[in-house]
């Protein structure tokens, strides 16, 4: 069956098919990540910095963002709190590199050409190969160099590095999520260390103040004891005068006129007791067997 003019329709003209989802141009996406700032979308130029998630920025753009965060709707760098959260990269330039532009007619532009290379194996930093940087020194090196030349020091500057602090540049989704978890753990650890240092700094002051308080308390207690032990002379005399006559310390049985001579002779203070023979004390049943 045909249409006017004897044309025969095709299947795709009669049956509607689902449209394929639009996909990103991989080459354009790679160029955007490795040659342009993730924040300002301007070409990367030194000094170039990287965050703990492995994204590349112009340092100038990061400073402008920190000065006025409200004017930026891009949340790609929401995790950057200050310049301490970015690392200035120590890049190795390729010799005889010449930047070419497509604006000039009749000139071929190689999109794979890069200004920076790996200092060990010479691979170009263009997104085709994986690159890492050391968080401690900021030196950038390729994955192949890390695997082939294993060392505990940086391959470029010789600084001692920890392999746990190696961050992949422009990694995949899983790698970025792993870096984000490490970043949060590191920040939590730093926060706890700051709190511990603050507590340790405050502890000596608290101990000294406690010692001073204890010394003041002991002094006040000792003063109270001395005050309670010492009674004023008039008060002592008044208390002695208030006692009964026979309870006083200066009372004498021999001098008391109310006592009879027979009662006075019982005590050793009587004159008759002076000539009285003294006897020895003998216990009952001394057990002399």
Image: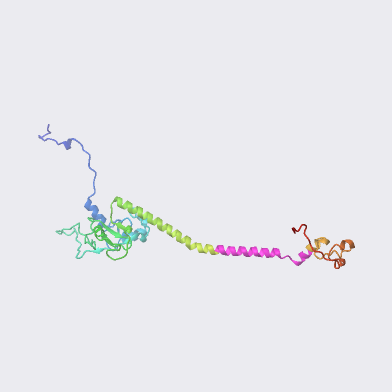
In magenta, the rendered stretch is 209-238
Residue 182 among those drawn in magenta: no
Q: Is residue 219 left or right of residue 49?
A: right
Residue at 51% across / 64% down in the picture? Answer: 204
Residue at 78% across / 65% down in the picture? Answer: 237
Q: Is residue 158 left or right of residue 211?
A: left
Q: Is residue 256 above or below residue 175?
A: below
Question: Please, which colouring scheme is shown?
Answer: rainbow
Question: Which residue is more in the foreground, 66 or 267?
Answer: 267
Q: Is residue 85 left or right of residue 104?
A: right
Residue 220 among those drawn in magenta: yes
Question: Which residue is more in the foreground, 190 or 15?
Answer: 190
Q: Whole-percent x and y of residue 53? A: 32, 55
Q: Main secondary structure of the magenta part?
A: helix
The reply to whether residue 78 is visible in this rendering is: no
> Which residue is farthest top?
1
Q: Whole-percent x and y of residue 2? A: 12, 33
Q: Whole-percent x and y of residue 121? A: 22, 61
Quadrant of the rendered image containing residue 195: bottom left
Q: Whole-percent x and y of residue 101? A: 19, 59
The reply to whether residue 237 is visible in this rendering is: yes
> Which quarter of the rendering shows the C terminus?
bottom right
């Amino acid at each position: 069956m045909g249409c006017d003019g004897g044309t025969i329709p095709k299947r795709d003209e009669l049956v509607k098919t689902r449209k394929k989802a639009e996909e990103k141009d991989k080459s354009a996406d790679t160029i955007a990540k490795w040659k342009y700032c993730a924040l300002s979308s301007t070409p990367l130029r030194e000094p170039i910095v990287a965050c703990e998630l492995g994204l590349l920025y112009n340092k100038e753009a990061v400073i402008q963002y920190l000065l006025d965060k409200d004017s930026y709707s891009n949340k790609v760098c929401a995790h950057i709190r200050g310049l301490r959260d970015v690392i200035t990269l120590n890049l190795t330039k390729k010799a005889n590199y010449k930047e070419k532009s497509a604006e000039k007619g009749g000139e071929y532009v190689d999109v794979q050409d890069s200004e920076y290379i790996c200092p060990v194996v010479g691979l170009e930093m263009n997104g085709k190969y994986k690159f890492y940087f050391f968080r401690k020194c900021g030196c950038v090196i390729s994955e192949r160099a890390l695997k082939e030349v294993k060392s505990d020091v940086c391959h470029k500057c010789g600084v001692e590095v920890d392999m746990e602090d190696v961050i992949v540049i422009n990694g995949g989704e899983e790698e970025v999520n792993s870096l984000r978890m490490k970043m949060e753990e590191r920040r939590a650890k730093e926060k706890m260390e700051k709190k511990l240092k603050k507590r340790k700094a405050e502890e000596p002051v608290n101990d000294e103040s406690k010692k001073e308080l204890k010394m003041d308390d002991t002094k006040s207690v000792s003063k109270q004891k001395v005050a309670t032990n010492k009674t004023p002379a008039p008060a002592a005399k008044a208390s002695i005068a208030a006692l009964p006559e026979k309870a006083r310390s200066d009372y004498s049985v021999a001098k008391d006129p109310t006592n009879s001579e027979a009662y006075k002779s019982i005590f050793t203070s009587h004159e008759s007791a002076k000539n009285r023979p003294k006897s020895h004390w003998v216990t009952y049943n001394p057990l002399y067997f």
